[in-house]
Image (cartoon, rainbow, N blue to C red):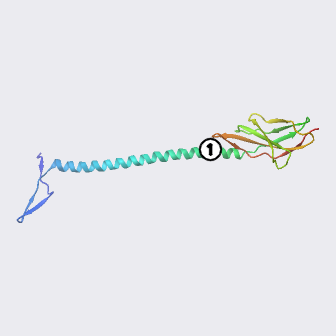
Amino acid sequence: MNSKVDVKAHTETYDNLVTYSSVKKEEVKTTAVKKLEDELKKAQEKADKLEKELGEANQKTQAANKEVEKLQAKLDVRTKNIRLKSAKSKKAKQATIRWAKVKNVDGYVVEYSTKANMKSAKKKNVKASTISLTVKNLKKGKKYYVRVRGYKVIDGQKVYTQYSAKKAVKIKK
């Protein structure tokens, strides 16, 4: 096979005569290959850029999913209801408060006050395994109001359930 191929790549006119220049087959091939290689390189760069964007989008999606899980956990805790079973005073200066156990809480907060609006209420924290609390050093003959709520620690913050209904207890004399 002949290494030279006549190609009408360039024409020139001299004194009404048309002449064609000769171009080597390898030169034509090299030009075409270079063009394809450039296109391939551009396509690869575009693919790399899209892959990077996809990776960033996946990371954002994962972060958003974690945030949704945290919010769902907070919502699950906040919608739980604590049921206050009883508030009784069997001995002078003390009251025993009992409540129903709630799943997936880390502990409970028991509040008690002499005011029905729970202003200046005192608080006692107890573990999740506890379902009763005896409060001591209360005033004899006074009426106390008590309520309970649970909490769960999510990302280092306490998320509280709703309060139970208030119950009143009169302390024995």
Q: Is residue 135 above or below residue 29?
A: above
Q: Is residue 173 above or below residue 53?
A: above
Residue ID at (68%, 45%): 76
x, y percent for residue 115: 85, 47
In the image, farthest residue toward the top? 129
Residue ID at (14%, 58%): 10
Residue ID at (48%, 48%): 57
In this rendering, position of residue 159 left or right of residue 46: right
> Which residue is at the front of the view, 114 or 33?
114
x, y percent for residue 147: 80, 44
In the image, farthest residue toward the left? 15
User: Could you say whether the residue bearing mark 1 is in a helix, strand or loop?
Assistant: helix
In this rendering, position of residue 124 left or right of residue 77: right
Q: Could you classify mark 1 by the number of other residues whose Cα lies within 10 Å: few (under 14), some (14-19), or many (20 or more)? A: some
Q: Which residue is mark 1?
A: 70
Amino acid on which disc 1 is placed: Lys
Residue ID at (82%, 50%): 117
x, y percent for residue 119: 81, 48
x, y percent for residue 83: 79, 43
